[in-house]
Amino acid sequence: MSYYLRSKRLDIATEDALVFVLNADTAVKYGLCAGDRVHMCWKDICVFGSIDVTGTYVGYDEIGLYEDIWLKYGIPSNDMVTIDIISKTHAVEAIKKKLLGGVLSFKEINTIMHGIATRKLSTVEITYFAASSFSPGFNEQEIYYLTKAMAENGEELDFRYLKKKIVDKHSIGGIPAKGVTPVLVPILACFDLIVPNTSSRAITTPAGTSDILEVMMPVALSKEQIVKTVEKTGACLAWGGGIDLAPADDVLINIERPLHIEAYDKFIVSIMAKKVATGIEYMLVDLPVGKGTKIEHPEDVPIVAASFKKLGQLFDINVDIYERRPKGPDGYGVGPVLECVDLMRVFEQHPQRPLNIENTALDMAGRILEMTKTVPAGQGFNLAKEKLLNGEAKKKFWEIAFAQGATREMNSNDFILGDYKQTFRAVKSGTVKFISNKMVVLSARMLGAPFVKQAGIHFENLVGDKVEEGQVLFTLYATSQKRINLAKRYLEQELASMVEIE
């Protein structure tokens, strides 16, 4: 049954929360309670969301629309909309079954993915499903079903008509400093490979690849824009959520972000679903392992690697694993703007560029070039390095950026950091042995990253560097003193644990 209400724009922004606000008396009239799911339609636009109830913000027979909704869909105030109450779906029963230890069929999993992608399921229901990734977890068949359903409940890309090998690299994440992918992709594109790279926003780091790149170029591209960019340049550096590429995954990411954790099953499915949806044929998976990473125990590596490879075989994707043991961030900068500085310094071959990012990107590029038989075995690294040294990689990066909508080419001196800063100094002389990625993430988030692009941490020294007592170890940047003070109080207690010097 449909009910007619008058729209009212609310000057309140949320993080993509699809919530409609009713007056308490209106809610009683229609038998609705806070949290109930409804289907709201205005003209030819229909949106699923949840109900909030108020006694003051909206009047009788009005429906309040948060800024996220009326800005996105252009719904005016004082116009008629309809709402329909959504009955509990089969997806809820499937979630209950999983939480109780049951094994789900493809039909059940597809119903859940469709419910998440269309927002028919509430945040609470989605949270329970996300929790099932940890306990009881999924078997191999369910992981395949999850990947297939997540990929199919959204946009799909197919570049086979270009008659070239389609490749990509993806990291499981967890390591601050995300400059490897933006260096790697243009290098591969220089070899006439198709690289439709789509990345996520931050979950367990202070900035995902997309958070960094959007400082310099648009990353929320439509399907048509991605296709045009790839056709023109051979690659793209896009945010997967911009085109509803496995949209259920982006909803789950927002649910998981406050906890800063992901189950193995979840990140394997998340990565593979988006690669299936983009039609990847060859893929290199970056697996950072060790203290402070997502895979802290080396004995778990064979399990994760086998899952990636088995899924790859089922979807005709040739998967290779790149295992590494980082003992700190990959680069000097942590946070969107600071990581852009590192990235540009690699392309510029600046004396203070992060060699770890450069060498890791070149090594990965070499692996992909050799795995696709684009270059002879043993020559991948050196041939990839040629593209960096002769400037072809930098030229290709900006070719991709301008195709995506960038308006100017930037260099490492063009970026503006937060006006507020705080330095921390070494309390003793020695060699930096370890930098806690988890503490770096927490500190950078206290400063406002990734949402405040100018916020973050710049390290003067990385693992393996020698330092003298009193020498600056790192500097915090933020756009408010309050943010600086918050991180400062934490680090004054935890400095020796975050940066270990021996």
Image (tube, grey):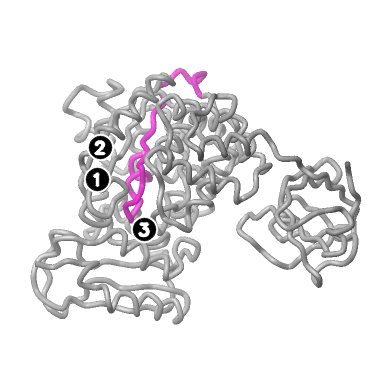
Residue name at image x 31 percent, y 67 percent? 458
Query: Image quadrant of residue 246?
Result: top right
Q: What is the distance, in whole Å, between disc 1 and disc 3 at their CAs?
A: 22 Å
Mark 2–mark 1 CB contact (< 8 Å):
yes
Which tag, 1 or 3, sits closer to the chain's start? Answer: 1
Q: What is the distance, in whole Å, between disc 2 and disc 1 at their CAs?
A: 8 Å
Q: Which residue is mark 2?
A: 301
Instruction: Rate crowding at label 3 as few (under 14), some (14 to 19) or many (20 or more) other CA atoms within 10 Å.
Output: many
Residue 410 colored in magenta in the image: no
Q: Which residue is mark 1?
A: 289
Q: Residue 340 placed where, x, y %?
A: 39, 57
Which residues are the magenta region?
A: 159-184
Mark 1–mark 3 CB contact (< 8 Å):
no
Pick the residue in front: 253 or 73: 253
For residue 488, above or below residue 1:
below
Q: Which residue is mark 3?
A: 339
Q: What is the distance, in whole Å, between disc 3 and disc 2 at their CAs?
A: 28 Å
Residue type indicated by callout 2: Val
Q: Residue 63 placed where, x, y %?
A: 83, 58
SS under mark 3: helix
Residue name at image x 23 percent, y 45 percent? 297
For residue 314, above or below residue 408:
above
Q: Residue 264 placed where, x, y %?
A: 37, 40
Residue type indicated by callout 1: Val
For residue 465, above or below residue 185:
below
SS under mark 1: loop
Residue 176 colored in magenta in the image: yes
Look at the image and tell me in which quarter the N terminus lies.
top right
Which tag, 3 or 2, sits closer to the chain's start? Answer: 2
